[in-house]
């Protein structure tokens, strides 16, 4: 296709060839070809070997770069602008893809033809260097922006991650952390990982370092010391970050707090065990009732068999036997009534329910020296609840009180159990207190939020279970000091309105 003066004008305006003499431009014109490309035409694809340069006469060309699964637009070239100028110097692969946005007219100059012109006109070399430096700067700016966007995206991922994440160098010096890690392990953050994250077993540090040398992923469940000295059970995964030639090797540490999960698992196991004990107790009570019926019947018939001339003291002995049988009957009845399917809501008389639980607990060894004083509010309406869960709450309160009194070594052991109707708040209140030493202030602040226990062999799960069950009932629980000394726990459970 014949060339026209428009090529001369384009070359004069093009940054790549601007400022060259007419002799050089004439030489370039003689070697350039004008071609038309329909919209969507691919001038070259990323990775193709470059062997020519394009100068836009009419239309617009998009420069696209592949990134992950999508393409990002680096630039647009219009009339008078050069595309693919690096191909004039080197046959390296194309850095990006060039696509015609609409119908385009482009001048094309091959590398061989350009080298012929450059050999005759050394001044063109200086102009090329100027353009290449400008384009390099432009490319660096684009790459810096991409890097900043990538770093910002990384930081946003770390911020929203619910899992604590820490990046260290190969010597376990902390480089990057996220908010979840700061929240779990506390501030101020330490420079060395194992000074900040303090495992209970020091041997784990050597184990992690040994695995890191092999380049494999290390995963363990470990116990670490929390910011307040509490024990945190974590699942930790360490993945080595390889050095890809930039000297930036490191290690990624991802933690998962398993403390609450393990607590719930242990509570579930304990409830299963208690449920099994309840089933066994109910079966034993059922069998005992059969024997009690025989004994009671014979005790009633004995006066008839002995007649009027029975020895002195027989009536007193028979009355004592009847009372003992009645007490055994109350005990077996409490065993039967304490059996409730876990999670099932039923209506109960709160006072009767608590009486039965106390009757069930009294024969146990730890309650033999315990005096249980009760005060029942008879105006409390029927309460709808998970009787199995409420049973565990009450057992834990009484067991904690009994253990606290036993450790105090006092001469008297008294637990106070009472109920109260709170019509203003449509609630029933269960109050369990004791006259022991009370709850230490440092324990009081954390009693229903963390695993805390004043007993040497305690695990602190009991109060967490109490809080969970009460919360599931829509109620509240509070711990405080009892008037007259000792500790007191107050549980408020909502009552269903009559119209509901």
Image (spheres, grey):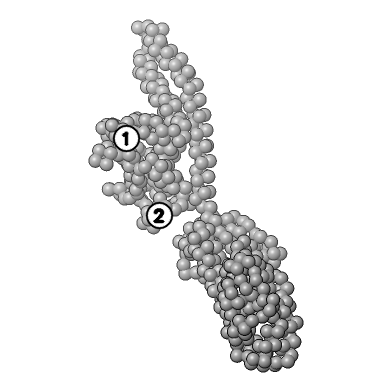
Task: Tell me the crowding category of disc 2: few under 14, some 14 to 19, or many 20 or more residues within 10 angstroms, Cα based.
Answer: few
Image location (x, y in percent) of residue 173: 58, 71
| Residue beneath the point at 50% across and 48% down | 263
Where residue 418 appears, x then y in whole percent?
Answer: 31, 38
Q: Residue at x 66, y 80 (%)?
A: 3
Q: Report the quarter where the C terminus lies.
A: top left
The residue drawn where x is 31% and y is 50% is: 481
Report the disc number at residue 446. Answer: 2
Q: Is mark 2 on a helix, strand or loop?
A: loop
Of circles 2 and 1, the one toward us is 1
Q: Nearer the viewer, residue 218 or 281?
A: 218
Circle nearer the N terminus (2, 1): 2
In the picture, which quadrant includes the N terminus? bottom right
Quadrant in the rendering for residue 293: top left
Relative to 245, 275 lies left or right: left
Q: How far apart are marks 2 and 1 (CA)?
A: 31 Å
Classify 302 as above or below 438: above
Between 390 and 110, the residue placed more toward the observer is: 110
Q: Residue 496 carries which label?
A: 1
Tag 1 secondary structure = loop
- For image coordinates 49% across by 38% down, the residue present is 271
Q: Which of 32 and 348 is in front in this view?
A: 32
Q: In this view, does 494 lie to the left or right of 367?
A: left
The answer to whether the residue labelled 2 contacts the one labelled 1, judged by CB atoms less than 8 Å apart, is no
From this viewpoint, is residue 74 visible? no
Residue 459 on image: x %, y %: 49, 49
Numbered marks: total = 2
Work out whether residue 357 can be spotted. yes
Q: In this view, does 447 lie above or below 332?
A: below
Say whether residue 183 is left or right of residue 315. Answer: right
Q: Is residue 419 above or below residue 477?
A: above
């Amino acid at each position: 296709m014949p060339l026209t003066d428009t090529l001369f004008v384009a070359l004069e305006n093009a940054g790549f060839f601007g400022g060259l003499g007419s002799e050089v431009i004439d030489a370039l014109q003689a070697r350039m070809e004008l071609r038309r490309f329909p919209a969507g035409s691919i001038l070259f694809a990323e990775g193709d070997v470059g062997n020519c340069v394009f100068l836009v006469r009419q239309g617009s060309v998009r420069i696209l770069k592949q990134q992950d699964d999508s393409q990002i637009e680096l630039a647009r070239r219009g009339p008078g602008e050069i595309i693919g100028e690096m191909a004039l110097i080197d046959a390296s692969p194309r850095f990006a893809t060039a696509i015609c946005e609409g119908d385009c007219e482009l001048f094309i100059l091959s590398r061989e033809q350009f080298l012929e012109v450059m050999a005759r006109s050394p001044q063109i070399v200086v102009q090329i260097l100027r353009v290449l430096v400008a384009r390099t700067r432009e490319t660096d700016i684009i790459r810096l922006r991409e890097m900043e966007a990538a770093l910002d995206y990384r930081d946003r991922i770390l911020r929203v991650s619910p899992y604590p994440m820490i990046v260290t160098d190969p010597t376990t010096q902390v480089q990057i952390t996220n908010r979840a890690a700061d929240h779990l392990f506390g501030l101020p953050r330490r420079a060395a990982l194992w000074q900040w994250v303090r495992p209970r077993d020091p041997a784990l540090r050597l184990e992690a370092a040994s695995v890191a040398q092999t380049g494999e992923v290390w995963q363990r469940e470990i116990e670490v010391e929390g910011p307040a000295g509490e024990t945190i059970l974590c699942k930790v995964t360490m993945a080595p970050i390889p050095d890809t030639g930039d000297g930036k090797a490191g290690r990624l540490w991802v933690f998962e707090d398993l403390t609450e999960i393990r607590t719930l698992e242990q509570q579930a196991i304990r409830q299963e065990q208690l449920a099994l004990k309840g089933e066994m107790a109910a079966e034993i009570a059922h069998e005992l009732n059969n024997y009690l019926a025989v004994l009671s019947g014979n005790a009633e018939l004995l006066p008839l068999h002995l007649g009027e001339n029975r020895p002195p003291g027989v009536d007193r002995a028979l009355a004592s036997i009847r009372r003992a049988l009645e007490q055994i009957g109350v005990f077996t009845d409490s065993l039967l009534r304490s059996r409730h399917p876990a999670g099932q809501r039923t209506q109960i008389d709160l006072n009767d329910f608590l009486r039965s639980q106390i009757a069930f607990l009294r024969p146990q060894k730890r309650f033999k020296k315990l005096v249980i004083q009760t005060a029942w509010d008879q105006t409390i309406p029927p309460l709808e609840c998970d009787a199995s869960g409420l049973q565990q709450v009450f057992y834990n309160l009484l067991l904690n009180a009994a253990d606290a009194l036993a450790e105090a070594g006092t001469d008297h052991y008294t637990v106070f159990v009472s109920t109260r109707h709170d019509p203003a708040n449509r609630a029933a209140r269960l109050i369990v207190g004791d006259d022991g030493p009370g709850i230490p202030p440092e324990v009081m602040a954390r009693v229903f939020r963390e695993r805390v226990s004043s007993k040497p062999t305690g695990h602190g799960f009991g109060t967490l279970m109490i809080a969970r069950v009460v919360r599931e009932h829509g109620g509240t629980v509070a711990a405080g000091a009892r008037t007259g000394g000792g500790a007191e726990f107050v549980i408020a459970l909502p009552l269903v309105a009559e119209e509901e």
